Image (cartoon, grey):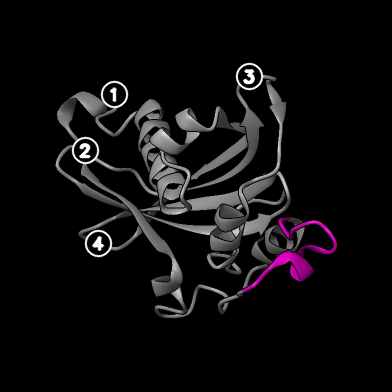
Amino acid sequence: MSDARRAASSAAQPEPGAAQRRTAVTPSLGEGDGGRAALLDTYRGTVYPWHCDHMNHMNVMWYVGKFDEATWNLMSHLGMSAAFLREHHRGMAAIDQRISYQRELHAGDTVAIRTGVVDVTDKKIIFFHEMRNADTDTVSAVTLLTGIHLDTQTRKSCHLPKAAADKARELVVAYELPWKS
C-alpha cells in the first residue's frame, strides 16, 4: 500500500466511538474479491451517447446522477422508501459529498454500483458508492456521502428509525477511500 493510500485510509476513519455503534464489520476490501461481495448492489445501468461530453466520455453530471439513484436504492433497502418518507414526513439530506474519478466511462459501457456504510450515528449515515465498469470490473469512480435524517415539517434533523439504523450498521465495512480528507 502506498504512503498516500495509507494516509487517505487513516484520514477517512470514522469519529471516535463509532466502533461501539456498529453491529457488524466485514473485512477490509482490496485483495482479490476481499469482501467486495459484502457490498450492496444499488445500481446497474448503461452509459448512453447523450451522457458523454465533447471529450467523448461520461460527463460528471451523470456520475452524480447515477450515484444519486444508488443512494435512493440504499435508502429503500434500509426501509426508508419514498413512500415511508412521505408518510412519516421525513427526508434525507446530503450534507457532504466527495467524488474521486478513477477511470473514464464511454458510451455503451455498462455500469454497476455497489455500496457500503462507513458509520452510523443517531441522525447520520456516512456511506460510499463504488462505480465499476461492469464489463472490465475496474473502478471508475468512488463517492463518499454524509446524509442526515430530517423532519420535513420542522426542517430539523431527527433520529434515524431504529430499524433503518440497525440495517445500515449491518452494511458497515472497512474500505480504503481514495483521498486524504
| Local crowd size for mark 1, using a 10 Å CA cut-off: few (<14), some (14–19), many (≥20) | few
Task: Compute the Cα span from label 4 to label 3.
Answer: 45 Å
Q: Amino acid at mark 1?
A: Asp
- Residue 40 in the figure: left or right of residue 133: right
- Which numbered disc, 4 or 3, marks the residue closer to the eye? 3
Q: Secondary structure at mark 4?
A: loop
Q: Which residue is mark 3?
A: 153
| Quarter of the N terminus within the rendering | bottom right
Q: Nearer the viewer, residue 160 or 65?
A: 160
* Disc nearer the start of the sequence (1/4): 1
Q: Are marks 1 and 4 in contact (CB under 8 Å)?
A: no
Give coordinates of residue 121: x percent, y percent.
72, 52
Tell me which segment is drawn in magenta. Answer: 12-23
* Disc nearer the start of the sequence (2/3): 2
Q: Which residue is mark 4?
A: 136
Q: Is residue 20 magenta?
A: yes
- Which numbered disc, 2 or 3, marks the residue closer to the eye? 3
| Local crowd size for mark 4, using a 10 Å CA cut-off: few (<14), some (14–19), many (≥20) | few
Residue 118 figure quarter: bottom right
- Residue 82 in the figure: left or right of residue 14: left
Residue 172 position (above or below residue 63): below
Q: Which residue is mark 2?
A: 47
Q: Nearer the viewer, residue 49 or 68?
A: 68
Residue located 57% across and 75% down the image: 28
